[in-house]
Every structure is written in C-alpha cells, then in structure tokens.
Image (cartoon, rainbow, N blue to C red):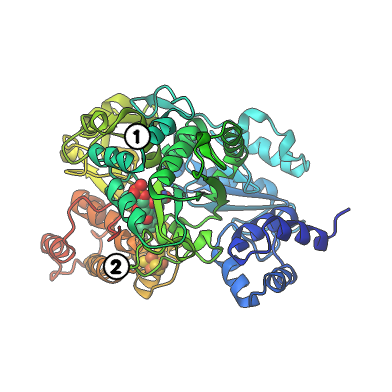
Amino acid sequence: MKTEQDLLEIVLSRHGRRADMLLQILRELQSALGWLSRATLSQVAAALDLPLAQVQGVSGFYRFLHERPVGAYRVLFSDNVTDRMLGSEAMLADLCQRLGVLPGAMSRDALASVDRTSCTGLCDQGPALLLNHHHVVTRLDGDRVAQIAELILARVPPAQWPTHWFEVQDNIRRADVLLGEPLAPGLALSAALERGAEATLGEIKTSGLRGRGGAGFATALKWGLCREAAGAQRFVVCNADEGEPGTFKDRVLLSRFADAVFEGMTVAAHVIGAQRGFLYLRGEYRYLLESLQSVLQRRRAAGLLGNAILGRSGFDFEIDIHIGAGAYVCGEESALIESLEGKRGTPRIRPPFPVQQGYLGFPTVVNNVETFCAASQIALRGGVWWSEIGTAQSSGTKIHSVSGDCERAGLYEYPFGTTVERILQDCGALDAQAVQLGGPSGVCLSRSDFGRRIAFEDLPTAGAFMVFDASRDMFEVARAFAHFFAHESCGFCTPCRVGTELLARRMDKLAAGRGSGADIAVLFELDRLLHSASHCGLGASAANPLRDTIAKFRPAYEQRLKWLHFEPAFDLDSELSVARRLTHRDDAGAHLENEA
Ligand SMILES: Cc1cc2nc3c(=O)[nH]c(=O)nc-3n(C[C@H](O)[C@H](O)[C@H](O)COP(=O)(O)O)c2cc1C
Ligand code: SF4
C-alpha cells in the first residue's frame, strides 16, 4: 500500500517538481487524500522550495481545495438562479435532513458534506450537483435525491451508482456553422499551413472575428500583437473557465467539437509562432478531462500535434490541460494566467497585456473556446465567407446557452443580428417578462427590449440567455446575483471585496422588509464606486443586475418599501440618470475590460 510520502513523490515527479504546477499538484494530492492537511502542505512547500505561507495562500484561495476534512461523499449543489427556480434549495434541504448534516458542514461520522457551489454550467438540465468534484448528477428531482441519500448511507461507491444519472446531454437545438457537422480533423490546419502564417492572419482579419468571451476584442489584432511582441517563446491559451452563471456553450463545444477547439489553437500557434498551449478547464468540468485527453492523444497520433506537425519541420506544438479549482475570477484572462502559473487567481495590473507579457512573462494569446472553433472554420473556408454572415461589426454566428422558463432549454446558434424575440419564440418561452443576457455581469432585458438585436452594435453577449416568466420576482433574481458576486469576489481590492458584500446585505435587508428608499440610494452609490474603483471586470459589473432591475422592474423594489417611511429626498429617475452618466454605461457592458 502506498504511503502519503510515496504519493507525494509520484505527484511531484509527474509535475517535474515545478512551482508553477502547484495548483495541479494540490488538486491531485487532494483527490487521493480527500483534503490537504497542514502537514501535506508543509511537505509540498519543502519539496518545491516555497514558503509554506505561499502554498497556503494558494490552497486557501480555491474553493475546491479543502484545508479541513470533508466527508467521503462531497456533494455540491449547483446554485444558479435557474437551479433554484427548479427547486434546488428544497432538494438540498431534503438531502441534508436525510444525511443528518447541515449545509456547509460535514456529518459527524465524516461520511458526507453537502454545500452549494456557483453555477456548474448545467442549467439546461438542472437542478444539478457535483459529487466528489469528479462526477455530475443532472436532472435532480425528489426521488433521485432520496436515492442519492440511500446510496451514500449504504456507502455505495459512485462508480456503482446508476450510470444514466451522470449523463450530460448536449441539447443542441439550433445549429449553424459551428454546431453543425464537425470538421474533419486536420482540414483547417492543412489549409492554414498551405496558405502560410501571415496569410492566415490576413484571413482572420478579413473575417472580422471578435472574441466570444465577452469583451469582443478583434482576434486578428490580438494574434498580430502577440506575433510581433518580443519574446523567446510564445503561448496559446484556451479559456475554458466558463464560469458566468447561465453559460454552458463551451461545455458542449468541448464535449462534441474538441477537435475544432484544439485545431483553432494549433492554427493560432502557427500564426503567432507558439510551441506550447494550454486548455484551462474549469474544475466543474473535470468530468470532461479523460475524453479531452483522448482527443489530444488521437491528434498526436495523427501528426496534428507534437513535432513537425503535418510533416512541416520546425512546426512543433503541444497542448496541456490545466484544471481550475472553483474560482469564477479565474475566467478573467490575467487571473487565469496567474492560476496557470500555480498561483492565486488574482487579476494582474495591465499593461502589460498578456499579448506582451503573459504566461511566465512571455507573449500569450488567450481566447475563448468558441473563438478558437470559429478560427478553425475561418482557416478552412476563408475570411470573406465568415464576414458575410452576421452584421457589419459582428461577423459570424453566436452560440446562446438558453435556460430558465422555456420549453426547450439548450444551445441555439444564430447569425449575429438575430432578435431576442426570435430566440424566445424558438425556445418556447411563451410568457417571458425578462431575459438576463450575458449572465449576471451582462444586461437584464424587459419586454420593451425584445425587438433588439444581439450584436456588438446593440446587445453583445458572452452567451448566457436566461429567461424569466411573469411569475418570477425580478428582485429575487437580482438578489441571487448580488450574492453570487459577493461570493466570487477574489478580495484583492477593497471596493469590490467590501462593495459586493454591502450590495448583498442591502438586498437582504430589502428582502426582509426592513429597507427604505435610502437603501436604494446606497445601492446606486455602491454601483458608482464599484464601476469607478474596481480592479477588474468582476467588481465593475457586480451592480449591473441591481441597476437594470431597479430601472426595468421598479415595482418589485417599491413593494418592499411600502410599509416603510419613503425617503422624500430619494428620486429614482434622477439617481438612474446620474448613475448612467457617471459610469458611461451603455448596454454593451458584459465585461467592461480594457484589454488587448
Ligand atoms: C470576471 C471575469 C470572468 C471572465 N470569465 C470568462 C470565461 O469564463 N471565459 C472567457 O472566455 N472569458 C472570460 N472573461 C473574459 C476574459 O478576460 C477574456 O476577455 C477572454 O478570455 C478573451 O477571449 P476572446 O478574445 O476570445 O473573447 C472573463 C472576464 C472577467 C472580468
Ligand atoms: S474587482 Fe473583485 S474580483 Fe476583481 S480584483 Fe478586485 S476584488 Fe478581485
């Protein structure tokens, strides 16, 4: 039997005893040991020649790393507002009661821990939960929860649970150029090699492709800047952190179109001259690791990765997969790079931008999963073909993750320029009063917005499309989002660390019927502060849902004030116009980043 020392040796040698592999080392040790004791962390620190405080700083940052014992069965309920709409809170309470454990705690016999976690990217088949950070259980209902309790109490290993519980459906409801027939592996790459790096960059430029991760930065400009930046090495990073609540398109792209993602990364490597790439996979998608590894293996065997790709001597490129550990902020590209380097996911001060100094200080391109899929299509079919789809400033198609109050949740791909109304009709949302577009950091739309078009010119989005029908209380939706941001703030800067917490508390106060107009005024004040003083896009967008819902669903707030003294000095309309003016915000603010 292996001792802890043997295990430590195996894991450390697998990762070359490198400090930049710290997060992966800790994840793997925890997966074998259950949790990370101080003794384990001290051994890791000594082996990597790091101060213990630095190792603890990392283990304390990521929610999926445990510095205290957790149950042998660790259950995490997905806690997006759409899971709650499907009854996840009652199911969590029921499971806790059956297992004799409190939410967030471990049972006395160390058998189980039950808690909540931010959206797991399964909103089209929720409520969902994560089991031992490795399995996902979808489509929960009362019966399934009761059976889960029985299996846990009988100590049945997850490998013996009904396999269909772990099935994750793709739910592709409308396919266009990206979600249609998958490209044969190697086709796009051959076309790019034949054309040459410079000409391929020219095709990406002609296509007008803009990043699909939220900010919409021009992909050709990003790749061109990286290609020109000084550096002995260059890196390509695929951002598969997909943590924005309500977004699950990248999950499906990675499950069904992984070849297109890796091919797009390899095309980028050819253009910028990179030899190494990383796919940063969110911890919640750990269950995809084996299938992704097998696609990589197949590509190596086919000469699409490794040395002398497709017989081109001098074109060498490898892709490694790094797994996150439950931190939404790591989707922000500079935080993601910190995390790739084995550190806490704290967003960097920019400039320098990643294209100048990214991974280990070298020029690095970071793109979203969907952006790489689009790039591989463009490499094959050319920039003009892509530019003719969509609108003038928003070429191509966009994939929407549709969930909430509709008959057919799932993925819908449309050319840019499609109206909100069209998507609502197609997904069977018969009585929608609101759509949260682009997730909590995006924009809340009411009926009067449904004729608007999804495009960078009007309504940009990173991909979430959450529908709320007339029965939903939009105040409660905004309150859930306020708690999400407070929970996910990385704590690095005071305006966000304190501001997001204050937002959540004010919303709780209003919910408890103890609020007044003065509390609404404070919400606006906090919005201004967060916008102007936050270090990254998380803090800057944290008050968006409150401001939008106050403007568009005002009665939901007013009814909570009606038994209380209403501050005569408080004027909602003038507060709204001041807030808009001060923050220069139009509805384009999915991720208000200043990036390259
Ligand atoms: C808090 C926060 C979370 C983010 N999460 C993601 C994410 O999950 N996936 C993503 O591609 N971009 C995310 N972004 C945007 C990235 O910083 C970056 O703009 C993007 O990965 C660039 O890729 P693109 O040019 O292909 O859009 C996030 C930004 C912020 C501020
Ligand atoms: S704005 Fe929030 S998430 Fe971003 S760095 Fe500051 S504390 Fe961290």
Instruction: Locate residue 449: give its quadrant.
Output: top left
Q: Which residue is mark 1?
A: 195
Q: Which residue is situated farthest in the top direction here?
A: 181
In this rendering, the count of numbered labels is 2
Whole-percent x, y for residue 45 in the image: 68, 72
Mark closest to the chain's N terminus, 1 or 2: 1
Q: Secondary structure at mark 1?
A: helix
Q: Residue 370's x, y, as percent?
A: 39, 39
Q: Quadrant of the C terminus?
A: bottom left
Instruction: Say if 279 sits above or below 531 in the image.
Output: above
Residue 256 lies, with reference to residue 96, above or below; the image says above
- Find out if the beta carbon at label 2 lies less than 8 Å from the nearest ligand 2 atom: yes
Disc 1 marks which amino acid?
A: Arg
Alpha-carbon span between mark 1 and mark 2? 47 Å
Crowd class of label 1 (few under 14; some 14 to 19; many from 20; radius 10 Å): some
| Quadrant housing residue 437 | top left
Is 473 in front, or is 444?
A: 444
Q: Quadrant of residue 229?
A: bottom left
Q: Residue furthest right?
A: 1
Q: Is residue 573 above or below residue 258?
A: below
Q: Position of residue 126 (x, y in %)?
A: 49, 37
Which residue occupies the foreground of this view, 295 or 506?
295
State left or right for residue 52 relative to residue 369: right
Ligand 2 quarter of the rendering: bottom left
Which of pointers 1 and 2 indicates the residue nearer the eye?
1
Q: Would residue 475 be visible to someone looking at this image?
A: no
Q: Position of residue 544 (x, y in %)?
A: 27, 56
Tag of residue 530: 2
